[in-house]
Image (spheres, rainbow, N blue to C red):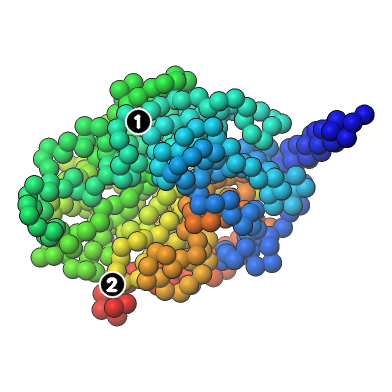
């Protein structure tokens, strides 16, 4: 027998054995054997939680998904070429990736291709303009065959072009078509000048005809365009984190609020106002909802939807004509993924609550940049039952962030493993962490959370003082 044939059968045997072991280990908590790294992979976590590094980096990345056998799939942030996905497999059950392979026979068309989700045996992923899917199987790490084209965006590459996805229980797929501007600015109102002060907004805003909302499609039909779907909700500027909550039978998203309140209307908004406003919005999105973009923004201090200055607002006028979020999140923190925890590994207080990956701000100067954490919001029914908590910190590796580039890592994607572990990806190097709970679920309480409450006083997590926290 030739060496190639012997090697083939040996490799096949190892994969099959690893697959059997993986099914047993990932699907029953009792057989859970891995432990966290000594330093938790550099993360700060609540008591009883441990973190381990799955891989030090697969390249700048966006979202990730974990299959029922523990295989991990990551969407790379790459604008050209092919092979824009990465697959990872742990063959010796230590929690670390032993096999890392790039794949994806499709053209990358922009660095904000973001999505990676698994639904009913299919791996769905998106470039900026196209949503693809491939059928997974139980043995092969890399899906066979050419990617199928599900939906094509017919419009040119633009800002905020990520195609985030969610799936309901009725064969529908929900897709974000985000708006590329802050407030649908009409630059013809500012001819022959570089100043943005007093710029007006377009009315009606033409972008709302084709963008600034969520569209619904049939996930089983291939080769669709936006005309084949139906607008599910509108007035939503830019959602990157989108998910369907099966228990509540509802779509949820986290919206990126607008920027430049001060530069567009300095007579009404100070630099501090520009730093702490407007809220990033945590939305429970119902069919027919209109969240008011670009005509409004949400002020989480006043808990009101305010009229935007480009449309006659003055930091005082508000409106009740539009849908409101279930919670206002800190301004400019860039919530880039949302996951409702359904596992049984973590303590009961985390069950059905929401984890949010905050990518971090880029434009809060003269105040420090902020975010760069994974947060948690407990839920009671369909609404938050407590404030935003810091669940995982340690990504920036610096105390004060003057510029986004100062952060070593930026949390990006979230995924739940079949054993209830939480996976976190980051966008700079493509590092991946796995968070596990090894403490006592029955006694977990305030003592285990004390350390995380102290993390709220970091310059990148606290509300800045208007006078004392400037970095100029």
Tell me the quarter of the image containing the N terminus: top right
Tell me the quarter of the image containing the C terminus: bottom left
Label 2 neighbour load within 10 Å: few <14, some 14-19, many 20+: some
Residue in the picture at 35% in, 24% down: 225
Label 1 neighbour load within 10 Å: few <14, some 14-19, many 20+: some
As drawn, the label of residue 153 is: 1
SS type, badge 1: loop
Q: Is residue 123 visible?
A: yes
Q: Is residue 330 visible?
A: no
Q: Is residue 366 above or below residue 1?
A: below
Classify residue 431 by image quadrant: bottom right
The first of marks 1 and 2 along the sequence is 1
Q: Is residue 326 left or right of residue 66?
A: left
In the depicted view, which residue is nearer to us: 328 or 212? Answer: 212
Classify residue 471 by image quadrant: bottom left
Q: Position of residue 108 (x, y in %)?
A: 45, 38
Residue in the picture at 52% in, 40% down: 84
Q: Position of residue 255 (x, y in %)?
A: 34, 47
Q: Position of residue 386 (x, y in %)?
A: 42, 56
Residue ID for mark 2: 366
Q: Is residue 102 left or right of residue 276?
A: right
Residue in the picture at 77% in, 47% down: 92
Q: Is residue 429 above or below residue 293?
A: below
Residue in the picture at 44% in, 25% down: 150
Of labels 1 and 2, the one closer to you: 1
């Amino acid at each position: 027998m030739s060496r190639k044939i012997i090697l083939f059968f040996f490799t096949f045997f190892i994969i099959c054995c690893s697959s059997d072991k993986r099914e047993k280990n990932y699907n029953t908590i009792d057989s859970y054997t891995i432990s966290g790294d000594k330093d938790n992979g550099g993360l700060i976590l609540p008591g009883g939680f441990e973190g381990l590094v799955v891989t030090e980096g697969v390249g700048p990345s966006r979202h990730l998904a974990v299959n029922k056998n523990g295989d991990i799939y990551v969407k790379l942030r790459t604008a050209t070429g092919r092979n824009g996905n990465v697959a990872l497999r742990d063959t010796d059950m230590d929690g670390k990736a032993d096999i890392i392979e790039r794949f994806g026979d499709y053209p990358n068309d922009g660095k904000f291709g973001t999505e990676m989700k698994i639904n009913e045996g299919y791996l769905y992923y998106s470039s900026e303009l196209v949503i693809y899917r491939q059928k997974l199987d139980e043995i092969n790490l890399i899906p066979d065959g050419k990617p199928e084209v599900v939906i094509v965006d017919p419009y040119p590459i633009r800002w905020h072009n990520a195609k985030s996805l969610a799936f309901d229980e009725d064969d529908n797929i929900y897709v974000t078509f985000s708006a590329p501007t802050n407030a649908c600015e009409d630059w013809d109102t500012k001819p022959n000048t570089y100043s943005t002060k007093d710029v007006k907004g377009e009315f009606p805003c033409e972008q709302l005809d084709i963008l600034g909302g969520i569209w619904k499609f049939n996930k089983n039909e291939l080769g669709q365009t936006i005309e084949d779907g139906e607008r599910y909700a509108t007035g939503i500027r830019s959602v990157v984190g989108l998910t369907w909550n099966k228990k509540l039978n509802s779509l949820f998203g986290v919206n990126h609020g607008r920027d430049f309140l001060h530069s567009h209307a300095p007579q009404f908004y100070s630099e501090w106002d520009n730093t702490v406003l407007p809220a990033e919005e945590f939305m429970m999105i119902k069919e027919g909802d209109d969240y008011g973009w670009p005509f409004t923004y949400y002020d989480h201090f006043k808990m009101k939807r305010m009229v935007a200055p480009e449309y006659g607002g003055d930091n005082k006028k508000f409106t009740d004509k539009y849908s409101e979020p279930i919670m206002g999140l800190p301004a400019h923190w860039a919530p880039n993924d949302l996951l409702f925890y359904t596992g049984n590994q973590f303590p009961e207080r985390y069950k059905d609550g929401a984890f949010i990956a905050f990518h971090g701000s880029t434009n809060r100067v003269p105040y420090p940049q902020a975010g760069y954490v994974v947060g948690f919001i407990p839920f009671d029914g369909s609404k938050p039952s407590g404030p935003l908590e810091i669940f995982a910190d340690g990504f920036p590796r610096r105390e004060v962030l003057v510029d986004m580039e100062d952060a070593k890592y930026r949390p990006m994607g979230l995924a739940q493993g079949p054993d209830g572990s939480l996976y976190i990806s980051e966008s700079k190097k493509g590092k991946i962490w796995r968070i596990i709970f090894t403490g006592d679920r029955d006694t977990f309480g305030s003592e285990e959370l004390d350390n995380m409450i102290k993390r709220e006083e970091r310059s990148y997590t606290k509300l800045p003082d208007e006078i004392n926290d400037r970095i100029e």
